[in-house]
Every structure is written in structure tokens, then in C-alpha cells.
Amino acid sequence: MARLAGQGSESTHEGAADAENVYVHAGILRLQPPLCVHGQLSKVKQNAAMDAMKEEVAATAARLVVEEGLEYGAAKRRAVKQLGLSARGGLPDNDQVEVAVREYIALFCADTQPAELRALREVALQWMERLARFRPHLAGAVWHGTATRLSDIYLQLFCDDPKSAEIGLIDMGVRFDATTVTGFQGEPVEALSVHVCVPALGESVGLHLMVYDFDDLRGALKPDSRGRRPRAIWQRCAVCCMMAPMTEKQTESAESNPMPMSRRTMLVAGAVATLAGLGAAWWGARPTTAGHTGGGPVDGFWALQWDAPQGGQVRLSEFRGRPLLINFWATWCPPCIEELPLIDAFFEKNKANGWQVLGLAVDKPLAVQAFLQKLPLHFPVGMAGLSGAELGRNLGNLAGGLPFTIALAGDGRVIQRKMGKLTQADLDTWAALK
């Protein structure tokens, strides 16, 4: 597309030069200058019509970006088709579409978009902290401030070994899909896509990890055509998350006048304390890795209760004193749905040995009730809603992803914890622990 635009620009320039030559020779050939003036006016009208078309395409594309979550390229192509226009006249550039997106958000989403943007930035921050060894940089709409609940999160990783990011996700137990896409320098790069939960929105979004070589980091933070940084390092993202979503001018000001490092470090520490320090209030010991014992919850933990799908209450106090597996899940989370039959079979097989299972649905009550009518479970389910996501973080799920499962011994100690889909091997190992 850039090549076609360049060719069109060159033709226009040559046409302008020809018109000028005709006008200069008019005195020699005794032609009437008004004919050439008329031709120039026609070109002005054509350019004005082209500009108007681009504005219309940009406005339509902006609506598709905000309301359907399309990327800019796909939105522009759809807009041209919807308007019945031809792309030969040229499409608006991404900067023009972004301006239209900001205008659309200001008109129709001013009351909801700031909270949605903040929720996405918080999740991005959690994953940037989790992937810190791969030098993560935040890019796209979440960084520039135009993201809504339909937007995905894009992180660019700059790795010494391109395969290290995949290995890291596997070690974390995170399920991902790998594809090849075009990178910011036009080269093919690997993209690792993950479904992540956004607790504040009550739904999941796509997290796309673009894997670059470490050498690509050179020049990656150079300002774009509008003088903005195209991507953000972890500390800069932390600053954005801890303040209200900024306007475009505020973002540019923050980028051109960064905070002193001491102040920035304080904000980063505050962000980490907000996201990670909650666990210390609930647990007597630091969250443990799988296979290690840890501290137990304070008394307030066992006082929690939730509505049951079939009516009544599910009280944690009723599970105290015996081994307990707690699974956080949602109906909109594919890995959650895939592992539920395994967990149900685990419960049926091991309940005689004292094992209990509690499912906490981080979802809307009607969705949970409808799902359980189609796939009944033998273990109790509590409709935790968004409070379930907060509880999960308190139990060690700092990334906020789903599914998340934790196992408590009979005395309340943490004996296992996993973020990601359980396997049969996981459950077989857990069954032997009490």
C-alpha cells in the first residue's frame, strides 16, 4: 500500500509540472491562460474531493475500531467497502484514523472508555512485570490511550534468544498460539497470543507478544511521525497505569518531560505494591511455587461466602479442615471449559479420600447458571463475580489470568498453585498431597 501511495504521489507531481509548462508556453503559442487556470482549478477540486473521501473513510473506520475492535488496516478496508468507494484514490493514513478514533471516543464513549483503558493498562503492567526478563515494551492502542474493552494488548519482547519467550511461557504453564506477523520494521516476527482475563471488565482479551531480537531494540524508542514514542518500557507503563487515562496532549507532554528516576521508581514500587502486596495481607508467607508448602490464610478468608447457582450460599467455612482444591474459571474462558471435566473427575475419584473441590466463577450469574444447565458439575460452585478475580490475586495469581487453581492442605497450607489449564498429570500429582 505504501508503494502504491508513492506512485500516485509521483504522478500528481508530474501532472503539476506539465500544467506549468503549458502555461509558460502560452505566450509563445498565443494560447489563452484561462484554459490552464481552469485545469488547475479542476485539480484543486479533485484534491478536495479526495481529502473529503479520506475523512469519510477515516470516520467510518474509527467507528469500526471502537465498536468492533478492528485493527486500523482492517477497519479502513471495511470502511471503503461499506461506503462503496474505491481504494484507488488513496486511503487515510493511520495518524488520520487515530485522530478520528479519539474524536469518536470523545463523542460516544467518554463515560466508559477511561475506565476500560485503565483496566487494560493494569493487566498489561502485570504481564510486563511477569515477562520483565524479556524486556517488554507496550505498544498499540493501550499505550497511546485509545483502547476500549474490545481492544487487544500488544507487548513487544526483545530477547537474546527468540525461543526463550516460548520456553518462558511453557515454564509458566501459559497456553499460547504462535503465528508469524509483520514487525514494526517490515520484517517477519513471531507472535505468541494468549487469552488473559481483565477482572475489572469481567471478560478476556487477547494478549499478543511480538518476539524481536535484542538488536532490534536499537532505535525502537525513536519518536514516530507525530513526535511520540511508539512503545513504552515497563517503568513508563507503570506511571500510566497509576494515573487517570491521559489525553493525547498529556501523553505527549509526559513523554517529552519524563519524571525524575527517583519519582518514577516510587510510582513503580507503588504499582507493584498495589498488584502484588495484597497477597501478604492474606497469607502468612510469600506465595509459593508449585510443589512447595506455604503459609495459610487468615481467619477472614474462611468467612467468605458466595451465592450458589441453584440458590442458597456456598460458605468457605464448610470446607475447612480437609484438603481443598479451589478453581477460578469463567464461561468465556476456553481453557477453563476444557479443564472442568478433568476437575470434576478428580473430585469424583478423590472425594472418598477427603478431597474437596470448589469452583469460583469469575463471571455473570446468568451466564454461569445457563452453562451449568448444559454441563452439570458434581462439586460446589460459587458465583464470585469480579470479587473472585481480586481473591485470586490475593492467593498469588498476580497476572490475573484464568484459569487459576490453588490447593490447600487440611491445615490450610498452600501445597499447590497453577495459573493455566490443568493437566491430568497435574491432578494425579496433587491427589497424593494432603
Image: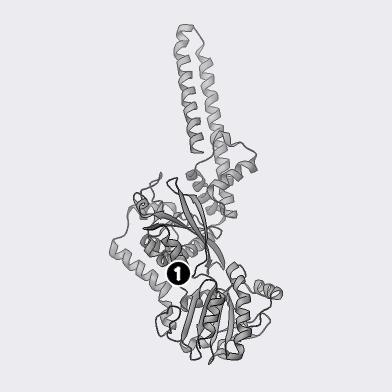
The answer to whether residue 343 of the structure is visible from this angle is: yes
* Element assignment for label 1: helix
Residue type pointed to by label 1: Asp
Q: Residue at x 44, y 64 (%)?
A: 167
Asked whether 362 or 420 is in front, the reply is: 420
Residue 61 at x, y percent in the picture: 57, 46
Looking at the image, residue 378 lies above or below residue 371: below
Mark 1 = which residue? 171
For residue 205, what is the image quadrant? bottom right
Residue lying at the far right in this picture: please name it: 373
In the rendered image, residue 9, in percent from the top left (x then y), is placed at 48, 30
Badge 1 crowding class, 10 Å Cα cut-off, few under 14, some 14 to 19, many 20 or more, is: few
* Residue at (57, 76) in percent of width and height: 424
**Residue 19 position within the rendered picture, expressed as x and y whole percent measured from the top left:** 48, 19
Q: As rendered, which of 250 and 326 lies closer to the eye?
A: 326
- Residue at 40 percent across and 76 percent down: it is 277
Residue drawn 61% across and 88% down? Answer: 351
In which quarter of the view is residue 87 placed?
Answer: top right
